[in-house]
Each structure stands twice: as structure tokens, then as C-alpha cells.
Image (cartoon, rainbow, N blue to C red):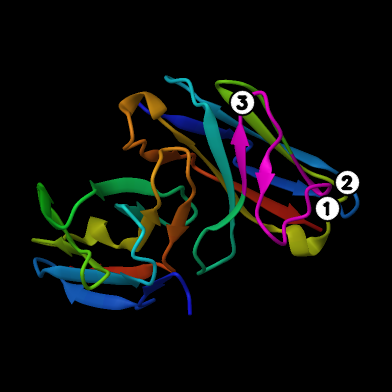
């Protein structure tokens, strides 16, 4: 079993729809949860960062963490064609210098 | 802020030669940098963790003699692929943390280097 599972997609939605992404993880010791966006042949860009269970909102993006279920989600409201990318969840134990464990990434396509 | 650059962005080399990739934190000092490789349509695979002034910590299965990492300063880490072979062709990405932000320490990624070995 992989430490972090993520549906590879592709996930195709019409422009303006809500994009719903999620990951599950196996190690309850993970403490920090991140979502990255990666365009083709580019480095990942940090979108959202959460520490505790609950919701965090930033503009059109909402991240949710449910530690009891070991489940994290990212929602993108009013999706735009420019949101078409691969979205990667990443999880980390403890301190800042610790490595990230990535999900496999979900490819999202927002159609105009 | 928190900009990480990589050079070159794309390199083609012949089998058997070595190639060096640079990773720089442009506007902050990074005590820890990470090196990843990514195959097409796959996620990032951590190769090694690099701390300034000390030897890199390699992930299981990564050949330390083949992938030489040098973190000589707080703003520069280099990855040298020695005796490259076609199977080393991949997208190599570095990242750096901002430890001064406390325990959060988000990782910021460079734009990546595409290596093609012919």
C-alpha cells in the first residue's frame, strides 16, 4: 500500500464548475498537508498548506483535512481553463526539514 | 519572495558523459534543499535531501556515486549525474525550505531541468 493514494484522473469539468480532488494516507503520524499545482514541464507551485483538521480557504481554493479518516481534499470553485494542470497532494511528518511524501497527482482539464 | 531557480532548463548529453544541474534560492537562504526526479505522467520521486555543509542523505535505491550532490552554500546546491545513460533521462526538480518561518517550512520548487541522454 502506498503511503499516499491519489486518483490519477484525468478529471474533466466544464468551465465554472467545482473541481473536487482528494487524497488518502496511511500514516496517522503525518502532520502537515499541502496541495501543489504543476503545469506540464514546470516545477510544482504551492497552492495550499494546512496543519490541523478542518477547512482552510484562499480565494477560489478550499483545503480540507480530516485526520480521523486520513483524508484530505482540495476544492476549486469557479474553475477556469487556466486551472488545467496536475494537482499533487503532499504530506509531511514534523519539522520543516523533513521530506514530503507526494500523491501520484490528478490531472485536471477545465473545458471552456 | 521564495524563488528557486534551476540551470539549465534543458540539457542534452551523450551517453557516458556527466552533467551538472544547479539549484539556487534567489531571495532566501535555504539550509535544506531536496532533489527529485519525475518521469512523464508520474509523481515526484525524492532522490536526496541536501543540507548545507554536510553530506546529502539519499533515498533507498538512489546511487550516491551516480548522483553527486553538493550543497556548498546556503543558496546553491548542485546535482551531477555521472556517466549518464539513456535511462537517466528524466525531469529533475529541486526544492528548498524556508526554515525561518518556523515549523511550517513550506517547500518551494524550482522550474525543473529536463535531461535527455542520447
Q: CA distance from mark 2 to mark 1?
A: 6 Å
Decide which of A94, A49 is in the foreground and name it: A94
Q: CA distance from mark 2 to mark 3?
A: 27 Å
Task: Report the residue at 79% width, 62% height from top.
Answer: B86
**Badge 1: residue crowd in 10 Å (few <14, some 14–19, many ≥20):** many
> Is residue A57 on the magenta stretch?
no
Image quarter where the N terminus of chain B lies is top left
Q: Are marks 2 and 1 in contact (CB under 8 Å)?
A: yes
Reading the image, the residue beneath label 2 is: B17
Task: Report the residue at 36% width, 46% height from top.
Answer: A45
Image quarter where the C terminus of chain B lies is bottom right
Reading the image, the residue beneath label 3 is: B52
Do tags 2 and 3 sit on the same chain? yes
**Badge 3: residue crowd in 10 Å (few <14, some 14–19, many ≥20):** some
Classified by dominant secondary structure, the portion drawn in magenta counts as loop
Secondary structure of the residue carrying tag 3 is loop
Reading the image, the residue beneath label 1 is: B84
Secondary structure of the residue carrying tag 1 is loop
Query: Above or below — where is A86 with respect to B76?
Result: below
Task: Report the residue at 52% width, 26% height from top.
Answer: B31
Amino acid at each position: 500500500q502506498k503511503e499516499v493514494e491519489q486518483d490519477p484522473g484525468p478529471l474533466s469539468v466544464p468551465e465554472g464548475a467545482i473541481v473536487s480532488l482528494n487524497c488518502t494516507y496511511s500514516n496517522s503520524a503525518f502532520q502537515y498537508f499541502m496541495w501543489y499545482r504543476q503545469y506540464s514541464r514546470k516545477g510544482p507551485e504551492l497552492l495550499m498548506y494546512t496543519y490541523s483538521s478542518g477547512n482552510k480557504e484562499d480565494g477560489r481554493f478550499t483545503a480540507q483535512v480530516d485526520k480521523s479518516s486520513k483524508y484530505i481534499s482540495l476544492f476549486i470553485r469557479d474553475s477556469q481553463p487556466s486551472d488545467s494542470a496536475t494537482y499533487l497532494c503532499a504530506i509531511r511528518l514534523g519539522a520543516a526539514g523533513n521530506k514530503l511524501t507526494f500523491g501520484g497527482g490528478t490531472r485536471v482539464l477545465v473545458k471552456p | 519572495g521564495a524563488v528557486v531557480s534551476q540551470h539549465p532548463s534543458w540539457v542534452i548529453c551523450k551517453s557516458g558523459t556527466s552533467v551538472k544541474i544547479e539549484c539556487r534560492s534567489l531571495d532566501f537562504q535555504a539550509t535544506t534543499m531536496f532533489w527529485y526526479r519525475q518521469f512523464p505522467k508520474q509523481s515526484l520521486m525524492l532522490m536526496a535531501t541536501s543540507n548545507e555543509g554536510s553530506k546529502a542523505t539519499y533515498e533507498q535505491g538512489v546511487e550516491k556515486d551516480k548522483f553527486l550532490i553538493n550543497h556548498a552554500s546556503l543558496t546553491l546546491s548542485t546535482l551531477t549525474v555521472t556517466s549518464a545513460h539513456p535511462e537517466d533521462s528524466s525531469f529533475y526538480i529541486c526544492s528548498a525550505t524556508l526554515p525561518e518561518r518556523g515549523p511550517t517550512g513550506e517547500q518551494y520548487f524550482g522550474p525543473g531541468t529536463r535531461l535527455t541522454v542520447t
